[in-house]
Image (cartoon, rainbow, N blue to C red):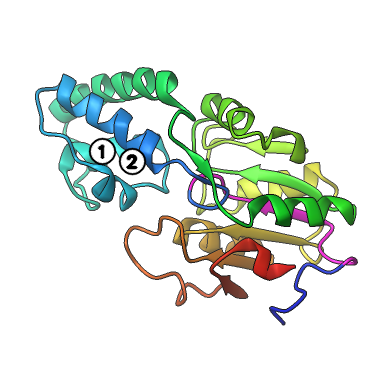
Amino acid sequence: MSLTGLFSPRWPGVALFDLDGTLVDSAPDLAAAVDQMLEHLGRSPAGIDRVRDWVGNGASILVRRALAGQSDWEPARPKDDVLFKDALAIFYHAYGQINGRHSVVYSGVEACLRHLKQHGCKLGVVTNKPEQFVAPLLKQMGLEHWFDISVGGDTLDVKKPDPAPLLHAMEALGGTRGTTVMVGDSAADIDAALAAGMPCVAVRYGYNFGRPVDALGADAVVDSLDELL
């Protein structure tokens, strides 16, 4: 797939975007909520650099990683599960108060979305962020008017890297595998697109658990979404 002019007037008919790390740098908000949670539990704050490496698989796994202090964590034991449920509730409350306060839209995003809309493309957000936080963040960032659908991490019974959320959004927007593209920043996004059988674009500036995205198998890898125009 050619990178130059990838988003042409004739293709794609549907474009799906991840949210955190692709459209919006939300790590400062997530880190603030994680640190409030940890401090409430009497633990040391993690800091934004570590939280950036933990984002991408949804709030539940983010909280588990924060409790473990690392990206890899062991399955919870029964006594750990009580702590996790308390920690998740604290995180949700904290993030609900912070959501969008320190986040920023990445450079190149508005130009890309505008170009696609001008050529009749239908746009959707497919994220692992809990659904209750998606619309408020899009509104806070001034992005909500671009999108025809949003699918959160708990909209369906599964989340990325399962392909079902992508296929759900694609079908809702009247797309097909041959006319739909997924744009994301992490292995969860690219693996979901590959499993769904749709072309995909990876961005280098987002959150991929501290690992480079170039080897994930995306059809194109860019430093800014305006490179696609």
Q: Do the residues labelled 2 and 1 touch (CB within 8 Å)?
A: yes
Q: In which quarter of the image is residue 202?
A: bottom right
In the image, farthest residue toward the bottom: 2
Query: Which three-letter amino acid code belongs to the residue tagged 2?
Result: Ile
User: Residue 100's x, y, as percent?
Assistant: 49, 30
Which residue is under mark 1?
A: 64
Residue 22 shown in magenta: no
Q: Is residue 223 above or below residue 33?
A: below
- Mark 1 Cα shell of 10 Å, populated few (<14), some (14-19), many (≥20): many
Q: Give the range drawn in magenta.
A: 9-20
Please give the name of the residue rendered at 16% of the width and 35% of the height, measured from the top-left corner: 45
Which residue: 61% across, 33% down? Answer: 138
Residue 162's disc number: none
- Please identify the quadrant where the C terminus is shown: bottom right
Residue 16 belongs to magenta span: yes
Q: Give, as a three-letter code, the residue at label 1.
A: Arg
Instruction: Evaluate whether residue 107 shows in this view.
Output: yes
In the rendered image, residue 14, in percent from the top left (x then y), is placed at 79, 54
- Relative image position of residue 88 (x, y in whole percent): 31, 25
In this figure, which residue is indicated by the disc labeled 2? 61
Residue 197 falls left or right of residue 54: right
**Residue 152 screen position, x and y as percent:** 57, 36
Image mark count: 2
**Which residue is nearer to you in this view: 33 or 158?**
33
Q: What element carries label 1?
A: helix
Residue 227 located left or right of residue 91: right
Q: Residue 197, can we see it?
A: no
